[in-house]
Amino acid sequence: MKPHILTFESYDDWDTVPLEEAYTVYNLPHGASLDTLPSEAFEAVQAFAFKGHNKLGADIMDAFPKLGMIANYGVGFDTIDVEYASSKGIRVTNTPDVLTDDVADLAVGMVIAQSRGIVGASEWIRSGNWAKNGAFELQTKVSGKRVGIVGLGRIGRAVAERLQPFGGEIHYYSRSPKDCEGWIHHSDIVAMAEAVDTLVITLSGGPKTVEMVGEQAIKALGPNGLLVNASRGTTVDEEALLDALETGAIKAAALDVFENEPNINKRFMALDNVLLQPHQSSGTVETRKIMGQLQRDNLAAYFAGKELLTPVN
């Protein structure tokens, strides 16, 4: 008899087919409540294939008395109450490493796109403004800029390595210096923000990094500064960022993440100095297939009584 699992959100066929071959699958679509599930699911489900950015806490875990494992689809697991899961003997896994390149690629892409006004320039043509009103307004150079990386983990290092050939200075924030010759270490985010032109945030999510980039750091970037967030929306004081963008305290921002996804603060919609992305940093076919495979491999290991591949507790 197949084990019973609950999947969250929607999956592509390359994930759905092998999941349904291996398991009896119940699904909780985006925005759906638990009471939409058939009653037998609550006693049958033994594992979650978790996906999305909604909170997964005690209320959901406790509804499934046989739950023993949560396989997260993604590297970040800050939306999962891992501490509570551990207290109930529920194992949690994630999909680290496989999305580093994609997140770093998009972060650098956002630096270039926002500095050079690529989205606005495309719209300038489409709207007929080029033919009617002439050249698009001058933008900002990317090469030679001082870039500060907030959080020099796998993704932060990959971003810095991609930006290094642009010939600028690489600064980074971490509690202690890393093995990266030629890069400039800072133990204070505000001091680093004062020293750079562009601030790229690659922190992990969770309680320890909530609003780590606060009002002081944002203002320290100055009126020509660019802030790029490719981590979690919680890592930035979003209200302070909006204030800075509205008043010109900083020049621009490029964001792939927000505090209340996907229902982001409406103040962003009125701004023409912020590039908005729908949390799609790992959104490539190649990477999503690998993420799905690793999620399934962790599920398979759990049900086979083997060591989990990428545990977080």
Image (cartoon, rainbow, N blue to C red):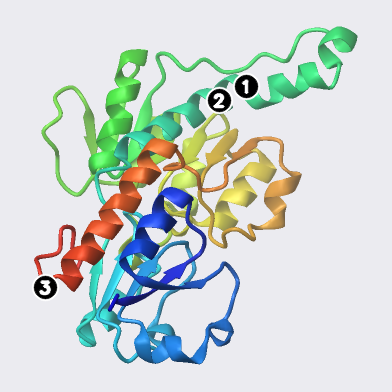
Could you tell whether 297 is left or right of 142 in the image? left
| Amino acid type shown at disc 3 | Gly
Where 78 sits versus 253, above or below? below
Residue hosting label 3: 305
- Residue farthest along the front direction in this orientation: 1
| Amino acid type shown at disc 1 | Ile
Q: Which mark is residue 113?
A: 2
- Residue at the location (50% across, 53% down)? 215
- The quarter of the image holding the C terminus is bottom left
The numbered mark, 3 or 1, whose residue comes first in the sequence reads 1
Report if residue 293 is visible in the image: yes
| Labels 2 and 1 touching (C-beta < 8 A) | yes
- Residue at the location (27% across, 79% down)? 1
Q: Which mark is residue 281?
A: none
The numbered mark, 2 or 3, whose residue comes first in the sequence reads 2
Give how far across and how far down residue 149 sits, in percent: 33, 37
Within 10 Å of disc 3 (Cα), the crowding (few <14, some 14-19, many 20+) is few
Front one among 227 and 48: 48
Q: Secondary structure at mark 2?
A: helix
| Amino acid type shown at disc 2 | Ala
Residue hosting label 1: 118
